[in-house]
Amino acid sequence: MTLENEIHVVVKAVIEAEEKVLIVKRSDDDEIGAGTWEFPGGKIEFEEEIEAALIREVKEETGLSVTVDHILYATSFFTDPLRKVVLITYFCQSSSSDVLLSEEHSNYMWVLKEEMRNLLPVAILGELEKVKFLQSLSVNQ
Ligand SMILES: Nc1nc2c([nH]c(=O)n2[C@H]2C[C@H](O)[C@@H](COP(=O)(O)OP(=O)(O)OP(=O)(O)O)O2)c(=O)[nH]1
């Protein structure tokens, strides 16, 4: 297979606990998006069920055991000229907010709407805007 035909399928979780949402910061030495805030998640393994992959990745990256609620959006983009990503983001719930980060991330925050707007990259905020996600959160946030 040539590099040009390689497509990575990535699943991400918008995790809600105690009316806040978890964002994580990519490590400063990451080849892709170093130092940027995002939602936890990662690549699915071939033949792995999508929701199982999401639960596995979230556990690896945050230590949290999540319940997958519903899909928020799916999108596709290049992370560099030869690397294509298909990314699916789900809304999830966690009963715990005790996060244990892996080496992939340098920081985490449980945030309200305004902090999400301030910290997440415009590409992610644009997708959330399309599905009116921030408006769907509790008015108290
Ligand atoms: N354009 C766009 N980029 C996004 C969205 N969500 C999201 O996480 N990203 C960015 C953050 C990362 O820079 C990139 C995904 O990185 P990646 O393909 O290496 O996947 P990953 O690190 O999660 O996978 P893994 O190595 O942990 O298995 O996509 C989105 O909705 N739109």
Image (tube, rainbow, N blue to C red):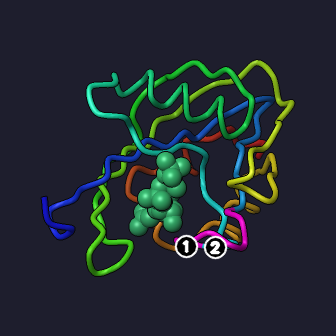
The crowding category of the residue bearing disc 2, from other C-alpha atoms within 10 Å (few below 14, some 14 to 19, many at least 20), is some
Q: Is residue 35 above or below residue 107?
A: below
Q: Is residue 120 magenta?
A: no
From the image, give the main secondary structure of the stretch colored magenta: loop
Q: Residue at x 51, y 22 (%)?
A: 68
> Image check: 109 left or right of 55?
right
Residue projecting furthest to the right: 98
Q: Residue at x 44, y 43 (%)?
A: 89
The magenta segment: 26-33
Q: Position of residue 35 (x, y in %)?
A: 70, 72
Q: Is residue 67 above or below residue 53?
A: above
Label 1 – label 2 distance at C-alpha: 6 Å
Please tell me whether mark 2 sits on a helix, a strand or a loop: loop
Please tell me whether mark 1 sits on a helix, a strand or a loop: loop
Q: Position of residue 139 (x, y in %)?
A: 70, 43
Q: Position of residue 52 (x, y in %)?
A: 44, 21
Q: Residue beneath label 1, please?
A: 31
Q: Position of residue 10 (x, y in %)?
A: 39, 47
Q: Amino acid at mark 1?
A: Glu
CB under 8 Å between callouts 1 and 2? yes
Q: Which quadrant of the rendered structure holds the N terminus?
A: bottom left
Mark 1 lies within 8 Å of ligand 1 (Cβ measured) = yes
Q: Amino acid at mark 2?
A: Ala
Q: Residue beneath label 2, please?
A: 34
> Image check: 82 left or right of 102?
left
